[in-house]
Amino acid sequence: MSKMLNQNTAYYRQVKLLVAVLPAVQWKILNIKKMSVKKHKQVMEKLEVVLSEKYFSS
């Protein structure tokens, strides 16, 4: 599975696009846009970690 999710594969790019359009992810992004710059950065970093662990771990 980890080979399929290598960042250089077409499969990885497709999964990344699918995750980006999930309603929960869109809602979170909308709320993040309303935050202060400092809070925005913290939350975006946390979101990236959570998504990479959930969808791109081996």
Image (cartoon, rainbow, N blue to C red):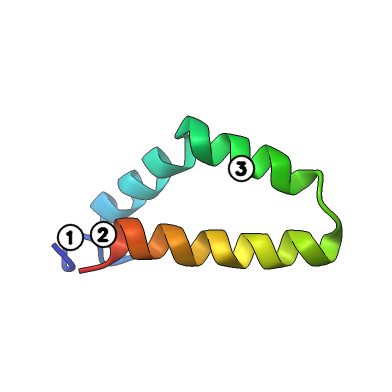
**Residue 19 versus residue 5 in the image, above or below:** above
User: Which sits in the foreground, 6 or 43?
Assistant: 43
Residue 58, x across and y down, in percent: 20, 69
For label 2, the residue is 9
Q: What is the three-letter code of the residue carrying label 3? A: Lys
The CA span between labels 2 and 3 is 27 Å
Circle nearer the viewer, 2 or 3: 3
**Res 50 → quadrant:** bottom left
**SS type, badge 1:** loop
| C-alpha separation, residue under disc 2 versus residue under disc 1 | 7 Å
Amino acid type shown at disc 2: Thr
Mark 3, secondary structure of its residue: helix
Left or right, 33 with reference to 28: right
Query: Counting residues from the N terminus, which is met first, the one under dot 1 or under dot 3?
Result: 1
Query: Which residue type carries mark 1?
Result: Met
Mark 2 in CB contact with mark 1 (< 8 angstroms): yes
Residue matched to label 1: 4
Identify the mark at residue 20; answer none if there is no mark: none
Estimate the x, y position of residue 8 in percent, counting from the top left.
Answer: 31, 65
Which of the two labelled residues, at mark 2 and mark 1, occupies the earlier sequence position?
1
Disc nearest the viewer among 2 and 1: 1
Q: Residues within 10 Å of mark 3 (few under 14, many from 20)?
A: few
Task: Determine the CA span between mark 1 and mark 3.
Answer: 27 Å
| Residue identifier under label 3 | 28
Query: Residue 37, position in %: x, y?
Result: 84, 61
- The residue positioned 32% from the left and 44% from the top of the image is 14
Residue sitting at x 13%, y 62% = 1
Around disc 2, counting alpha carbons within 10 Å, would you say few (fewer than 14), some (14 to 19), or many (20 or more)? Answer: few
Q: Residue at x 27, y 67 (%)?
A: 57
